Image (spheres, helix red, strand yellow):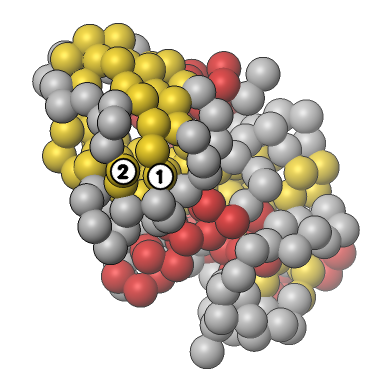
Amino acid sequence: MEITGNLPPTPAILSSRHPVTLVGDGPVRDEEIHWSLQNAPRVVAADGGAAKLIATGVQPQHVIGDMDSLPRDLTAQLDPARLHKVDEQDSTDFQKCLSRIEAPLVIGLGFLGGRLDHTLASLTTLIQSRTPCLLIGDGMLAFHVTQDIAMELPMGSLLSLYPLRRVTGRSEGLRWPIDGITLDPSGRVGTSNEVSGSVKLSFDNPGMIVILPDEVRDAALAALSSSGR
């Protein structure tokens, strides 16, 4: 059993001034990998995610995890210096990786879709991590808003706000504004909102997950990159 908590500081395995691609063992499309590498060329695999990369002709620079889902034949093909086994059982492979990557942004593939419990654990990890992360998968995007963010999205686009903690904030450019509303995972949530103009979001405390359709990934990446400056 893996018990999650706030990610503790750990020595970095990869330090980068540029965004990093992180590939997990969940559903991943080749097109997602190629798009991510264009925007984040340094690449890390979370355990069995190495098989997804190698299948597309990409060698991971590092493989991090407990190595319980990495096929033995692939293990033999990889440089041992690239393998970083983390035996702890109180964290997921996604947590193991994010806590050991220092970068302005991580693009995570293979952590959404597939098993529901894995997806929920991935969303929880987003609000625990000190490293900003854009998750892509199953036709959707998800990221944690930690500061004010502005996005230019197509009119009428889906924009869902899902709180993992009790959160208040303000919005512009949404059909249903959130000003004056307390959003809470055990109370009112903000799913199925709609873009009505230039979007600006601001929250009084951490814990808000923004969920968008996959077709706006370029706009989401640009907004996250700008908000981190």
Question: Can I make out residue 192 in this image?
Answer: yes
In the picture, which quadrant includes the C terminus? top right
- Give whichever of 163, 1 is nearer the camera: 163
Which quadrant of the view contains residue 39?
top right
Disc 2: which residue? 182
Specify the amino acid type for callout 1. Val
Q: Residue at x 56, y 21 (%)?
A: 227
Q: Residue at x 42, y 16 (%)?
A: 150
Question: Can I make out residue 218 in this image?
Answer: no
- Give whichever of 229, 200 is nearer the camera: 200
**What crowding class fits label 1: few (fewer than 14 Cα within 10 Å), some (14-19), or many (20 or more)?**
some
Residue 209 appears left or right of 14 = left
Residue 167 numbered tag: 1
Q: Give the image location of residue 202, x and y in percent.
A: 44, 26
What is the secondary structure assignment of the residue under circle 1? strand
| Residues at marks 1 and 2, CA–CA distance in whole angstroms | 6 Å
What is the secondary structure assignment of the residue under circle 2? strand
Determine the residue located farthest toward the bottom in the rendered image. 1
Q: Residue at x 24, y 48 (%)?
A: 189
Residue 116 numbered tag: none
Q: Does the residue at mark 1 contact the one at mark 2 (Cβ under 8 Å)?
A: yes
Q: Residue at x 19, y 44 (%)?
A: 191
Which quadrant of the view contains residue 146?
top right
- Give whichever of 67, 175 is nearer the camera: 175
In primary-sequence order, the first of circles 1 and 2 is 1
